[in-house]
Image (tube, helix red, strand yellow):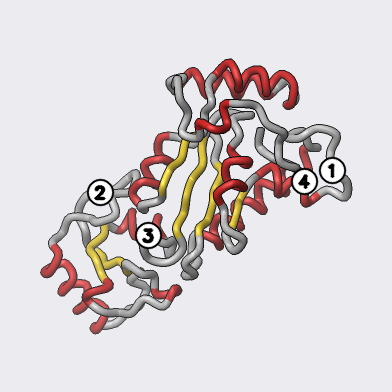
Amino acid sequence: MGRRGGRASQSLTRLVLETYGRVCWLQLPGCTGIATTKDHVIPHAAGGPDTLENMRPACKSCNSKRQDRVISGYGAAVIVVTGPPAAGKTTYVLQHARPTDVIIDMDRIARALMPLDPDSSHDYPEHVRHVAIAARKAAIRRATRLRERITVWLIHAIPQPDDLAEYRALGWRIETIDPGRAIVEQRARTMRPAAMMHHVERWYATHQDPEVSVAAMLATPQAPAAGGDW
């Protein structure tokens, strides 16, 4: 990520800009568009060499924001799974993940932090929720830097536009799970805390209600996976 100083590093930066131009290759949210630094395609922490072939021009903002997270095709693949509450995101991931993959799911993390399973899914004491949020952030930070050729499944129910723009710029795949509003509302009423309906309404206020979901097989209610994201 261009962390090495000295004349050799400065010379390599100049060579990268002369070779590839001054257009930032990352284009993350907040990008200035004008590259003044060099960025490792394969991060140095993941074994990427300090060579011209492994460098691309980047603006300071994008270089700092990317840090050493993987770009799609170089290390772990990242699939971001979005969708309204009770859509079946966790079930979808469990049906497609391989045994060596990594799954980052707020609900599963929170349940793992408690001595006993809560009476209802997605309903935890505030202190557990805060610890789970911190654990999720740490898991994302570590998993999105893996050099192993595995898949990281990141469940992010309602990402902000900047989040989506950043995921796409990094080449991460985005899967939207939505079997339709009628099914989601029925599941939320019977399988979620009452407050979850607010999040269902929030989702459909900003997303189209499709006739066919990305995961069409989830349109027919099934038995939810233990600790799942139905």
Q: Which label's residue is closer to the chain start, 4 or 1? A: 4
Disc 2 element: loop
Residue 17: image quadrant is bottom left
Q: Disc number at residue 71? A: 3
Count neighbours of disc 3 (C-alpha within 10 A) and say few if under 14, some if 14 to 19, many if 20 or more: many
Disc 1 element: loop
Residues under labels 1 and 3: Cα distance?
Answer: 36 Å
Count neighbours of disc 4 (C-alpha within 10 A) and say few if under 14, some if 14 to 19, many if 20 or more: many
Q: Residue 12, how many percent across, how many down?
A: 21, 77
Asked if marks 3 and 4 touch (Cβ < 8 Å), the reply is no
Count neighbours of disc 1 (C-alpha within 10 A) and say few if under 14, some if 14 to 19, many if 20 or more: few
Q: Of circles 4 and 2, which is in front?
A: 4
Left or right: 86, with 57 as reference point? right
Name the residue beneath numbered marker 4.
Answer: 111
Residue 138: image quadrant is bottom right
Badge 4 amino acid? Arg
In the image, residue 91 above or below residue 204: below
In the image, residue 116 above or below residue 60: above
Disc 3 element: loop
Name the residue beneath numbered marker 1.
Answer: 117
Q: Which label's residue is closer to the chain start, 1 or 3? A: 3
